[in-house]
Image (tube, helix red, strand yellow):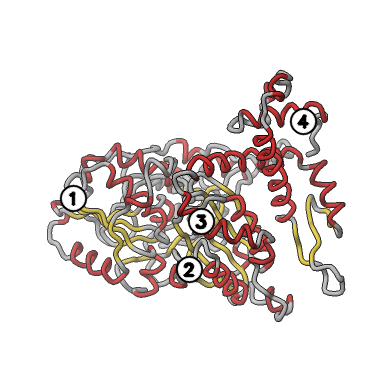
Amino acid sequence: MPSFTSPDQRDDLEACVLRFSDLDLKDTSLINPSSSLKTELDVSTKKKYSFAKKKAFALFVKTKEVPAPPFECKEKWWKCCQQLFTDQISIHRHVAIQHADEICHQTASILKQLAVTLSTSKSLKSADKRNPLKEYLTCNHEMSAWLPDISCFSPDELISGQGSDEGEVLLYYSYCDLEDPHWICAWQTALCRHLHLTGKVRIATEGINGTVGGSKLATRLYVEAMLSCPLFKEYMCKDDFKTSKGGACCFPELRVGVFEEIVPMGINPNKISYRNTGVHLSPGEFHKEVEKYLSQANKERSDTILLDCRNFYESKIGRFQGCLAPDIRKFSYFPSYVDKNLELFRKKRVLMYCTGGIRCERASAYLKAQGVCKEVFQLKGGIHKYLEEFPDGFYKGKLFVFDERYALSYNSEIVSECSYCGAPWDQYKLCSTPQCRQLVLTCLTCQGRGFTACCVTCQDKRCRPASSPTQSSFKEECECTARRLRIPRELAQPAQLPAGPEARSDAEDGPHYESSTASISPSLHRARFGVTML
């Protein structure tokens, strides 16, 4: 959207930002600060703001780059707002007019980061001289220097094999200090577009977390680029990238952004740091620990808890035998779950796991910080790496993934069932109601009978057209989520249940998906809540 701020107002706004860079640039109360404020600004501060604004503008333009056609003499064009720009002047004019607000916000973010960097630079002068980010930004500020050379490959080679059977999906993370996450964000955006990759990448001062899909050639070049980057090559190795069959088709688009946390637990990384994690166990070591735990005759009195750190809809279709799987919708609920059930973990050895290992880094740190556990261990590389070594091990069922595939299959076990008829079933589908984004387990037979929604309310809405153009994209609170406890309390460690369908009692959320266990017909009402134990 174009900005309607006048030039005079823009100058006042910039002056205000210089003195109060931590405030929201869109706050209308800041539009007309007193003129005396500008006179107080020293030359050094003005230079910092000018640098930040130019950097924000350059990074924004960089994210809009697309390869120019082979017959053109230019190497790059720009695409923005569904328009194609063939020269810098036109894209610069477009960004300045249409995206002034985004540039303003990006400038504020860079100023904040600059303030943090400057505040610590005095005590880190000797270390700063060896800082790889400073070295390569100074010597090679052009982002193109950090993109792989693809001149020896035709565009068809990079794009071909992006299908689910021929392409590949990467899953990775790295906890490491990043002084300039916005530069990394722009680089990652340019890198992924350069290689025709789609997916999601989260960047923060504490590190990077990503899952991207494309052709096998593109993912190989992406890994090589990551491992050659001075910021990551000392922290990552090829084994840190988990691979699975897939491709660019597994994600609707490319989304790269800067956040406070690379995995959203909802706690400032400075308070609960990845540096204070539990003991990392290799898949082989973890397998032996689980085997020892499952061999115990009385698991209720065991000093060990096998803890699933994922959301309930993930553990519903696959989990380790004998695990404690909290009935929570989001990872950000995990700290509250621990607080509410602290006695459950007192003097216990905790073996925790998640999809790829990243959630355990923060979860184990939080659990350790409570000071009640005897020991805390975590599965290095997560379920992904475990199943690579032990496809027929103690993990039964499918592995949920946050993309269009929904799940990966490593063994033939089915541990969940259709929400309607109770038949074994583990293939998720989105609720058929446009207003709902919940995941539903409904078998082919029930789908044929029209049972494709997550609850009675959604089933009724499915038959009615949206009343307004915006209603179809509005996510409503659903009947089955409204009655779900946000944070469940476990009075005692649940008893061991036999392997198979999840436990029942009377008593959601990845980046895009939620799940429901509710059914439609009252006669087939099979809602399931509580902690899942195998």
301, above or below 407, in the image: above
Which one is closest to the eye, mark 3 or mark 4? 3
Residue wearing tag 2: 241
**Which of 124/235 is in front?**
124
Which one is closest to the eye, mark 2 or mark 4? 4
Image quadrant of residue 103?
Answer: top right
Percent x, y of residue 511: 53, 50
Q: Residues within 10 Å of mark 4 (few under 14, many from 20)?
A: some
Q: Secondary structure at mark 1?
A: loop
Horizontally, is 181 left or right of 352 in the view? right
Mark 1 or mark 4, earlier in chain: 4
Which one is closest to the eye, mark 1 or mark 4? 4
Residue wearing tag 4: 10
Residue wearing tag 3: 129
Mark 1 or mark 3, earlier in chain: 3
Asked whether the viewer can see residue 448, the reply is no
- Residue at x 62%, y 58% (from the top left corner): 137
Q: Secondary structure at mark 4?
A: helix
**Which of 85/158 is in front?**
85
Residue wearing tag 1: 374
Give the spatial CA distance, label 1 vs label 2. Answer: 31 Å
- Residue at x 41%, y 39% (from the top left corner): 484
Mark 3 or mark 4, earlier in chain: 4
Mark 2 or mark 4, earlier in chain: 4
Q: Secondary structure at mark 3?
A: loop
Give the spatial CA distance, label 2 vs label 4. Answer: 45 Å
